[in-house]
Amino acid sequence: MVTERCINSRMVSTKGFEDLYPFAPHYLDINGHTLHYLDEGSGPPVLMVHGNPTWSFYFRNLVHGLSKDFRTLVPDHIGCGFSDKPDASAYDYTLASRVKDLDALVAHTVPEGRLSLIVHDWGGMIGLAWALDNLDRVDKLVITNTAGFFLPANKRFPLVLWLIKKMNWFAVPAILGANLFSLGALYLGASTGLSSRVKKGLTAPYNCWKNRIATLKFVQDIPLDHTDKSWEVVDRVDRHLTRLHPDQVLFLWGAKDFVFDTCFLDEFLDRLPGAGFHLFEDAGHYLFEDKPEETFDHIYRFFDKTKSCL
């Protein structure tokens, strides 16, 4: 049973969901902070980039399936999963830091050649920022329930996210104390019910106040105007998104997402007309939890190892 006792991130027990996540750990030191990642299988490399409040556990079904024919690499962002969770005074919890961390991981694991990416939520902006800086390294992109631009004109920023971003009197006790973001996502993120073991797996690393820092900082890092630290990176992605070729992109989307609804998919398709897409009408934000088999089939066909470039 996960308790409120803060323990080292790499010692969090997988008891109760170990059969769902039986992967060997790998670690990389980045500027004194330990980043945990998975490295399973061999073949054309596929890098999966998670968002908030998930971690590499979210991609477990894809790792199981794709690692038979591909090399699957899945990091836990600093502050997430089994990576270190430093205080904000020791690590800059911003988009630019995330992109640099991802670049360090790629340089360590796939120093040359091309790779494909699967991105979700904050992992979309992180992965797209890296991809647009390294277009010659990118084979294919699977983009799921995320953004690659500022908030669409017809969307309002959700009130609860605004409160977390702007009001520490609410955010600190709710997110760090009550674990509201991680626990709430269990019920808002998937349109199908999650088993107790999956719930335990998704929330296990966020077992105490200190270990929930990233779930707060990700929300506080959402740029709403040019004074926010991550405005410049998002602006660069927003302006250069059309440098991607539609043939190398596949959108898989859960229509019942409580934040990244179909307006975001429409915006992507307006910018990348001709890109492949599939809308899952009865799936939510946690698309790979709602539709594990169907999403795997779409991704495997898209990657088709006989056509992948190295």
Image (cartoon, helix red, strand yellow):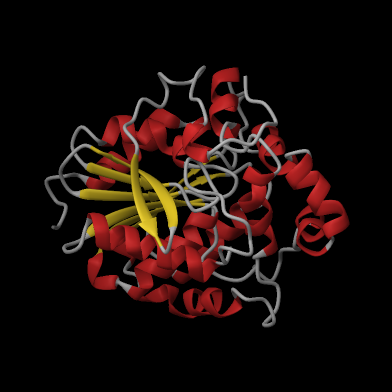
Depth check: give the residue in front, 85 or 198: 85
Instruction: Tell me where residue 181 appears, x and y as whole percent.
Output: 70, 43
108 over 18 or under it: above or below:
below
Where, by quadrant of the figure, is residue 210 drawn? top right
Q: Residue at x 65, y 51 (%)?
A: 213
85 relative to 94, above or below: above
Q: Is residue 111 left or right of residue 157?
A: left
Q: Nearer the viewer, residue 67 or 99?
A: 99
Q: Residue at x 52, y 31 (%)?
A: 12
What x and y, as percent, mark residue 24? 31, 32
- x and y, in percent, of residue 26 in the image: 32, 42
The part of the image, by quadrant, that contains residue 146 is: bottom right
Q: Could you tell me if residue 257 is visible in this image?
A: no
In the displayed structure, does residue 13 sit left or right of residue 163? Answer: left
Tell me what residue is drawn at x 43 percent, y 21 percent: 18
Among all residues in the image, which is located at the extreme right? 169
Work out whether residue 70 or residue 19 is closer to the camera in this orientation and state it.
Answer: 19
Q: Is residue 302 left or right of residue 8?
A: left
**Residue 135 visible somewhere in the drawing:** yes
Q: Position of residue 111 (x, y in %)?
A: 20, 62
- Determine the residue positioned at 80% across, 45% down: 174
User: Quarter of the image containing the N terminus?
Assistant: top right
In this picture, is 28 found above or below 178?
A: below
Q: Nearer the viewer, residue 82 or 143?
A: 82
Question: Which quadrant does the C terminus fall into?
Answer: bottom left
